[in-house]
Image (cartoon, rainbow, N blue to C red):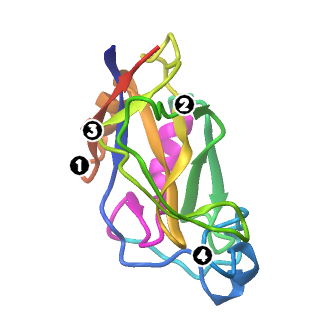
Amino acid sequence: MAERMSVLYGPDNGRYYYDERDRDAFCPRCKTRLKPVRADRRRLTVRKYDWSYTYDNQLIITRKAKTFLEERGVSGAEFVSVNRSDENFALNSVEVLAFDLSRASVRFIDKCTLCDGYAEVIGPYPAFVKDCPSDTDGLAIYRSDIEFGSHDATGPLILVGERLKAMLAQEFRELHFEPVTCTE
């Protein structure tokens, strides 16, 4: 087992991403998100940080961060404009890595009989990922296949390789990283 990747963390930005208009995107019983919600109608402005998370676990980046990733050819990133502007973006990844449930201490709490989801998925630390990419020094952003959190505040872990981690840490001081153990 090797630590060749890291989970990317940033500060809270003091905002919510989802609001009452998104009720149909969540299970009415357990409040778990059932489908993604487009960000183009959000009223969300973040000025303090280039990378930050909303209270409901959506990673938001600024145009500066988006340009940084694009200029370096980082793959896997999906940018969704927030507020139909060029200032803030919800950052997701199209590259999905499987979380290794056989090694991690993940707890699935309160299985919902309506949606088959869980009210809470807790315990992504330490992070174990199966089948890490062979080239983790490549410039790519990944996400975990499991969304962690409680009720309507869940989200995947955002993962980066060591080379991208070093570049991000040098440019964006608000970020911190935790190691990921690759198990296969």
Q: Which residue is mark 3?
A: 178
Q: Which residue is mark 1?
A: 173
Q: Dividing the picture into quarters, in which one does residue 75 lie?
A: top right
> Which quarter of the figure is the N terminus placed in?
top left
Residue 36: say if magenta.
Answer: no
Query: Are discs 3 and 2 less than 8 Å apart at CB?
Result: no
Over which residues does the magenta segment extend? 48-71
Classify mark 1: helix, strand or loop: loop
Q: How far is disc 2 from disc 4 in space, using C-alphas?
A: 36 Å
Query: Between 69 and 159, which is closer to the camera in this rendering?
Result: 159
Q: What crowding class fits label 2: few (fewer than 14 Cα within 10 Å), some (14-19), or many (20 or more)?
A: some
Residue 165 coordinates in the image, percent (x, y): 34, 31
Q: How far is disc 2 from disc 1 in space, using C-alphas?
A: 19 Å
Q: Which residue is mark 4?
A: 30
Label drawn at residue 140: none
N-term-proximal mark, 2 vs 1: 2
Q: Which residue is mark 2?
A: 74
Residue 76 coordinates in the image, percent (x, y): 61, 34
Q: How far is disc 1 from disc 3 in space, using C-alphas?
A: 15 Å
